[in-house]
Image (cartoon, helix red, strand yellow):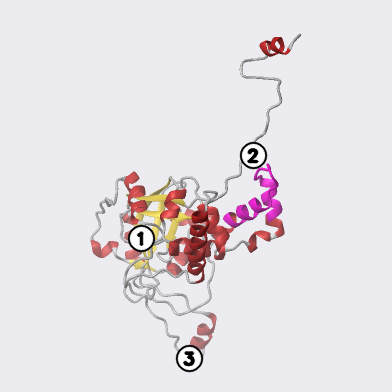
């Protein structure tokens, strides 16, 4: 049987001839190399001083306005939810200590776990506290929409979230209830959208991902990719091995921004749409908080027994600052993963 006869018996498109592997090496031009070096130098300079400049009263932006508008358009733009309560009631703010002692949960977690005992007592759950310093695109007023950004994407948040936001004035440690929010996952930033951000914003992301514990998964994947053998895939087993070695803690901010530049990592985005407002809950806050005061500490109790009346500050809406004290976890269960 000759070669032509053999080839006719093979399926279409197949041949028994050995295929030759061609390796193509793409050499960048001098112009491309020089531009890459300029970009790296500018990014390194920004990484050394990543603080974003902002005007008085302006919120620090993590992304450009075009990105914000495109994501908000998915939930109808910036149209607010109509609330029936008067402004004087919706403006009533509270402190995290009051919320923790009254309803349970951690005083630091973004999404504190409310223990079953407290849930049975008041039937409230899914508290979410957004700090403008960490979530600058969160809504600031009751009923308003907003965006939530994180170092990588994920699914929709389960159920409706009872969202609070801290006053943007750093001197005021007060939080305002905004409403019941549906938090939905939307398209993460594309590689092109990421590259459209200013160098300062990208440097800010690189530094924060290395500094904050919520960036650990990103650092883990970046380090694991560095240890991949040719043709090897990123597996859960490899990630676990890298995690156990703690080598992921050596990943630098520049390596982080490079991973986003290559499209290996993507900034995750979620929309926050107000779909309801718990008037009964807000009326409770208006009734309970204005005359509330923190419990007397043990040393103050002893002073009281000795005839020295302890100074207890009655907290009001416009003067709510608490004295400095150590953080205390008042949750029945463990606090939430994210912190603010």
**Mark 3 to mark 2 CA distance (whole Å):** 89 Å
Position of the N terminus by quadrant: top right
Task: Identify residue for label 2.
Answer: 23
Q: Residue at x 64, y 15 (%)?
A: 11
Circle on res. 307? 3
**Mark 1 to mark 2 CA distance (whole Å):** 61 Å
Nearest to viewer (mark 1 / mark 2): 2
Q: Residue at x 64, y 63 (%)?
A: 250
Viewer-proximal residue, 219 or 36?
A: 36
In reply to whether residue 241 is colored magenta, the answer given is yes
Horizontal and vertical percent position of residue 335: 54, 60
Q: What secondary structure predominates along the stretch shown in magenta?
A: helix
Viewer-proximal residue, 319 or 251?
A: 251
Q: Is residue 288 above or below residue 195?
A: below
Circle on res. 177? 1
Q: Is residue 108 visible?
A: no
- Label 3: element kind: loop
**Mark 1 to mark 3 CA distance (whole Å):** 40 Å
Horizontal and vertical percent position of residue 218: 57, 55
Q: Residue at x 53, y 70 (%)?
A: 328
Horizontal and vertical percent position of residue 165: 38, 62
Residue 217, quarter of picture: bottom right
**Which residue is outermost to the front?**
30
**Which residue is outermost to the right?**
1
Q: Is residue 295 above or below residue 102?
A: below
Q: Which residues are magenta?
A: 218-242
């Amino acid at each position: 049987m000759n070669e032509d006869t053999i080839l006719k018996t093979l399926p279409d498109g197949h041949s028994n001839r050995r295929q030759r592997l061609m390796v193509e090496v793409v050499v960048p031009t001098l112009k491309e190399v020089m531009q890459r070096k300029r970009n790296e130098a500018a990014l390194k300079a920004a990484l050394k001083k990543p603080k974003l400049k902002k005007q008085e009263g302006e919120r620090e932006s993590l992304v450009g306005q075009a990105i914000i508008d495109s994501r908000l358009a998915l939930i109808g733009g910036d149209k607010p939810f109509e609330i029936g309560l008067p402004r004087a009631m919706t403006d009533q703010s509270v402190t995290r200590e009051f919320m923790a002692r009254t309803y349970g949960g951690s005083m630091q977690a973004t999404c504190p776990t409310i223990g079953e005992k407290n849930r049975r007592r008041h039937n409230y759950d899914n508290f979410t506290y957004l700090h403008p310093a960490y979530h600058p695109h969160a809504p600031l007023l009751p009923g308003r929409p907003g965006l939530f950004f994180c170092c990588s994407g994920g699914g929709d948040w389960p159920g409706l979230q009872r969202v609070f936001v801290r006053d943007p004035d750093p001197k005021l440690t007060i939080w305002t209830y905004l409403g019941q929010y549906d938090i939905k996952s939307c398209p993460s930033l594309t590689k092109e959208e990421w590259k459209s951000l200013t160098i300062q914003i990208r440097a800010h992301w690189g530094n924060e991902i290395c500094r904050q514990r919520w960036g650990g998964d990103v650092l883990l994947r970046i380090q694991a990719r560095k240890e991949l053998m040719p043709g090897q895939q990123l597996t859960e087993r490899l990630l676990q091995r890298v995690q156990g070695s703690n080598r992921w803690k050596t990943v630098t901010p520049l390596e982080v921004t490079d991973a986003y530049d290559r499209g290996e990592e993507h900034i995750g985005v979620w929309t926050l749409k107000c779909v309801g407002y718990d008037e009964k809950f807000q009326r409770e806050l208006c009734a309970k908080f204005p005359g509330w005061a923190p419990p007397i500490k043990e040393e103050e109790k002893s002073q009281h027994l000795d005839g020295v009346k302890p100074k207890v500050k009655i907290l009001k809406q416009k003067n709510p600052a608490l004295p400095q004290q150590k953080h205390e976890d008042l949750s029945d269960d463990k606090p939430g993963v994210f912190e603010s």
